[in-house]
Every structure is written in C-alpha cells, then in structure tokens.
Image (spheres, helix red, strand yellow):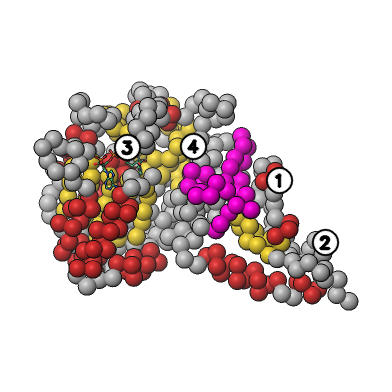
Amino acid sequence: MSTASTTPVTIMRQHLIDPEICIRCNTCEETCPVDAISHDSRNYVVDAAKCKYCYDCISPCPTGAIDSWRNMRTDLAYPIAEQLLWDTLPAQVALDEGPGVGAGDTAALPDDVAKIAAASTAGQGGIAPPPWSAAHPYVNLYSIQAPAVATVSGNFRLTGEDASSDIRHIVLDFGNASFPVLEGQTIGILAPGLDAAGRPHHVRLYSVASPRDGERPRYNNLSLTVKRVTADHEGAAVRGVASNFLCDLKKGEQVNVVGPYGTSFLMPNHPGSNLLMICTGTGSAPMRAMTERRRRKSVPAEDGKLMLFFGARTPDELPYFGPLTRLPKDFIDINLAFSRVPDQPRQYVQDLIRTRAAEVVRLLRDENTYLYLCGLKGMEQGVDAAISEVCGNHGLDWKTLQAALLLQGRYHVETY
Ligand code: NAP
C-alpha cells in the first residue's frame, strides 16, 4: 500500500563544500555573484536557498572542494548551521528515506535526479580538462593543518627602481620535502598572524613562475612573481597581507606553503604543440614557467610556436622585461603592450592581438595550439572581443572555436 504524501516531494542537487579539502582561501565567497557562500572560523558553506547554479565559483576553486554535490529532497536540504559543524561531507542519503516519502514518490525520483545532474554538468559547469599531453599533476599534498615549510633562498625586485610598483621574484626552497609542481599550477601561502576578526588569514594563491625541474634546474625550489599590494581595485590605500609578507621576506626565513593546486591550466608536452599566451602584470608568472620549460627542453626540430602578448604599464613595470627581450626571436614571438608610457598612446594586449591578426588566426586554426590567458579580470572581455574580431575577419567563428578549444583542454583562463 502506498504511503505517498499529498505534498509532492521535490529533489534538488544541493551545492556543498567539502570541509576536508577546502583551504579557506575565500575565492568562492569572492566569486559568488549572489552571496550564497559564507564562512565562519571553521567552514565555508553554501546557502541552498540562494545558490542559483551559475557555476562561477567552480573553476576558480584551487582544490576542487567547491565541486561537491548531493542529491537531496528539497525539504531536507542541509541548512547552513549544520554545514558549519561538519568535519567531513555526509554521504549521499537514499532519496526514498525520510518522512512523507512513499513508494509512489520514489518511483519518480531517479529520473528527476538524472535530469538535475545532467543540467548541472552541462554548459560551463565543470572544470576544463587539461591538454591531452599534459603531465599528471600532484595536488593537495599539503594542507593548512600540515603545511610544507619552505626556506626563502632569494627575493629580488623585478621592477625598476623608479617604477611605481614593487614586483618581486621570490625563490622558495623545499629542502628534503617533496613538493612537485607543473607549470601553470598554483601554491598557497599562509601568512602568519590573524585578521581583523581574530581568525587566521585566508590562504593566498600564487602561480608558480618556474618550470617543473625547479627555478634552478634539478634543485628542489620554485619561484613566485609577487606584486606588493598597496591599494585596492578602487585605488584606496590597503596593505595586502600575504604580498607584503612575501615581499618583505629575507633570505633564510621560512614560509608555510599549502598545495600544490591546479589540474587544468597545464601545458601540453607533445612535439609541435603551440602556446598562445596572453597576460598582464604578474599574470606573467605561469607564462614564464611554460616558456622556460620550453627553452630548457628545446628540440628545434620538434618545437611548436610560442607567441606571447604581455601588457604592463611601462617597460620598467614589466616583470622579466630584460630576460624576455633577450630570448631569440625564432624561439618566441613577443608582443609587449605598454599602457602608461609618457607621450605614447595607451596600448593593451588586445590592441596587439588586432595588429597581429593574421598570425593569431594562423595559430588558432592549428589544432596543436593551446591558448592561455592570465592576469587582470578586466582584460578577459577585451581579449575575447579582439579574438572574436580577428577570427571574424578571417572567416572563423570564435564562439564555435572557443567551445571546441574548451572541450579539448586547449583554452585556459586564470584572471583575478
Ligand atoms: P597591472 O600592473 O595593474 O596592469 C597590467 C597592465 O594591464 C597595465 O598595462 C594595465 O593598464 C593593463 N590593463 C588594465 N585593464 C586592462 C584591460 N581591461 N584589458 C587589458 N589590459 C588592461 O597588473 P597587476 O597589478 O600586475 O595585476 C595582474 C593580475 O594578475 C592581478 O589581478 C593578479 O591577481 C593576477 N595574477 C597574479 C598571479 C601571480 O602569481 N602573482 C597569477 C595569476 C594572476 P592600465 O592600468 O594602465 O590601464
């Protein structure tokens, strides 16, 4: 005999955050456009009543903790108060359990769940796959509870003495600790001390700027490109916690490091693969890592093309300006855009993409080309418009191509 209730039971795919993997870096909370994500001193949580399933938070999450889901009866969705107490994610509950559900209801459940699951992974929900020939990355080797301890073996200013920004090349040595990274991965820095609310500071993420075999080949070290943050996006004075901590570090001092992270923004390793790299400011870090990897491993007969678009305010503000301009022209095609050189028109990377349209399109037509975009969030739109325009002028439909590139792990974006 059916015990079906008179109120129909609805099923939701509840968005949750895995407290075991989450590094409390605040990226998801900053990204969520509807303020569905919040935190206390223990956990980051998602409000089921607010989450609109836009998936904006999924791909920026360094650990994948954000990509956690449970199929739930809507009336039994986990409330925030309960999520804040979790140490681990609860297991998926059987959907035919609980008050008010009977045989008549459960017969319909599997279909509903399948539909919800399909909807949630369609479109841009998932994390982009890496290039097919990428090396397999290690992730989440070190947690907040058990970080790796690195020793600073170098801290050099990259920007000119008169430049307005202080950008530094910081080398961290891991001694005997195992901390394997690939180009394009990020690491988390734990700045000491507490925030204004008396909680430990969020983890701050930095892209690795050195290739997989170390800043110095076959040394257990890596480098970061760090800009000292002295103002917020609106220009108001603010002292960036982790950036100032890192920029002030002296040789021999120690840093707690978590990670590594990143399974998508990785470089291809097969012969003939081309890298089309577009970056601004310190977004150059992963491009330096990939370029240096290619330079060290260069086998001229097998090398693909490297093309770089790099934007900075002035040559003095462009990290790695000297070493970059000394690279052979037949190794890498470098296009530098400067926005604040006195008496010169403001130039952005997207302007140079238009100038080099024929070559950009030639690369985009090549199925061995991998596209990387890293730096200021604001450039995403401008770069997209420029690529769309140059493609259109050459008979290519960018939206169709972009969708294919994403699916094939050939289009990677990391902007902040
Ligand atoms: P920045 O010096 O403020 O800007 C670099 C250049 O980009 C300037 O020439 C700037 O021009 C230009 N720019 C501004 N708006 C633009 C737009 N809409 N389109 C194209 N170009 C634009 O850059 P930054 O402070 O170094 O910032 C780099 C970003 O990379 C940060 O958001 C950082 O979080 C991110 N990032 C850093 C790392 C890392 O490992 N350190 C890794 C990944 C990403 P004007 O200002 O003159 O207009």
Say if the magenta span includes residue 246: no
Q: Which of marks 4 and 1 is nearer the N terminus?
A: 1
Q: Position of residue 382 (x, y in %)?
A: 28, 53
Front-most of 182 and 4? 4
Q: Quadrant of ligand 1?
A: top left
**Picture quarter with the C terminus:** top left
For label 4, the residue is 203
Mark 2 or 4: in front is: 2
For label 1, the residue is 82
Front-most of 10 and 149? 10
Which disc is residue 225 wearing? Answer: 3
Q: Which of marks 3 and 1 is nearer the N terminus?
A: 1
Q: Which of marks 2 and 4 is nearer the N terminus?
A: 2
At x 39%, y 40%, the residue is 206
For label 3, the SS is strand
Q: Distance between the residues labelled 4 and 1?
A: 24 Å
Say if the magenta span includes residue 39: yes
Front-most of 199 and 223? 199
